[in-house]
Amino acid sequence: MLLFALDASREFGAAVAAQLGQPLAAHEERTFEDGEHKIRPLVDPDGKDVFVVQSLHGGPSASGDDKLVRLLLFIAALRDHGARRITAVAPYLAYARKDRRTKPFDPVSVRVVAQLFEAAGCDGLITLEAHNVAAFDNAFRCRAVNLEPYELFAAAAAKCVGDAPAVVASPDVGGVKRAQLWREALETAWQRPIGQAFVDKRRSAGVVSGGEIVTGDVRDATVLILDDLIATFGTIERAATTIMKAGARRVLAFAAHGLFVSPAAESLMRAPVERVFVTDTVPLFRLAATAVRERVEALPCAGLFAAEIRKQHAAWR
């Protein structure tokens, strides 16, 4: 097996490699004066089972589009030079949010990205929390694995909640199924009833409305808001405010991916949220050190990816 981590995700890739107990394979990346790229392996991939780590979030040094192109070029180079199987490991998958048509002439962007991976010669993809698992599964013809952060979140929540009454809440109707699955997992792990709630929210042409009605009983409970990602933090701020008005005792927030684009820092410090838990698929480079220390914790998820890589490699052999 060969494990590569492209430059933009080298730190995450090194963490995965440490979990697997093997070194990262060497590669070269060059950028020409006009912004084009050359990227190649420095070890022979012929006949090998190859995994390539590249998280596709924007920043801090390159856009998500730039990272996607580099990953596709590298996969194509591996295919050209005889790799027997190539799996892309994209902890954050760009364009996964655009998975259906909501307006006339909309693209289904996740399907286009899937076609690009397949055209480059990719045999499989591993990601974390792909927004809509059914749409993600349908977009890819190659093997596509969606990992879930619920065990990581459960351990963090247990330390904060203790024996207090707890409710899992979705900040919108679209995330109800996600919240339900986590609530059921928590009930099994904690061996006690966990409530469920959701807040109404509607989005049209980028404008968010609603967020003033809670369905479910949150009174005197510690409420665990669960979402797939945090962008501006506005959705969670609105949901937390509504939930506290409905009588909740405390609010904690959980999301797989923490993008924290502006004005997330201001919203984060203003919101009635005691603590925010994300994974480290996206580094917290957009948040000032004080905000990170006081309110946000990034939970390492390299172990989840290492376990899946180990499982797939063992099955392939």
Image (cartoon, helix red, strand yellow):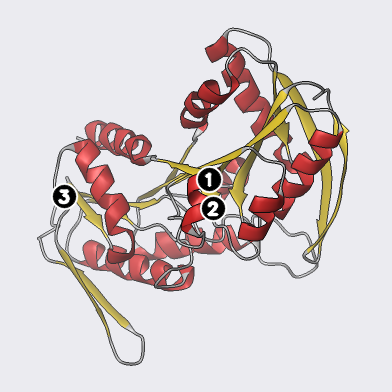
Which residue type carries mark 1? Glu
Q: Position of residue 123 (x, y in %)?
A: 35, 51
Q: Is residue 303 above or below residue 135?
A: above
Label 3 or label 1, whichever comes before in sequence order: 3
Q: Earlier in the sequence, mark 2 or mark 3?
A: 3
Q: Are marks 1 and 2 in contact (CB under 8 Å)?
A: yes
Residue 53's image quarter?
bottom left
- Does residue 167 appear in this view? yes
Relative to 68, is 157 on the left or the right? right
Question: Mark 2 or 3, which is nearer the eye?
Answer: 2
User: Label 3 amino acid?
Assistant: Lys
Q: Nearer the viewer, residue 63 or 86?
A: 63
**Numbered circle sitting on residue 39:** none
What residue appears at the point 66 percent right and 66 percent down from the top-left corner?
Answer: 107
Q: Residues within 10 Å of mark 1 (few under 14, many from 20)?
A: few
Q: Residues within 10 Å of mark 2 (few under 14, many from 20)?
A: few
The image shows residue 295 at horizontal and vertical percentages of 56, 44
Residue where numbered disc 1 is placed: 294
Disc 3, SS: loop
Image quarter in which the N terminus is found: top left
Image position of 41 with respect to 223: above or below: below
Front disc: 3 or 1: 1
Vertically, is 216 above or below 300?
above
Helix, strand or loop at label 2? It is helix
Q: CA distance from mark 1 to mark 2?
A: 5 Å
Reading the image, the residue beneath label 2 is 291
Secondary structure of residue under mark 1: helix
Residue 20 picture quarter: top left
Between 281 and 287, which is closer to the camera in this rendering?
A: 287
Reading the image, the residue beneath label 3 is 48
The residue at 61%/26% (across/down) is 182
The reply to whether dot 2 and dot 3 touch (C-beta < 8 Å) is no
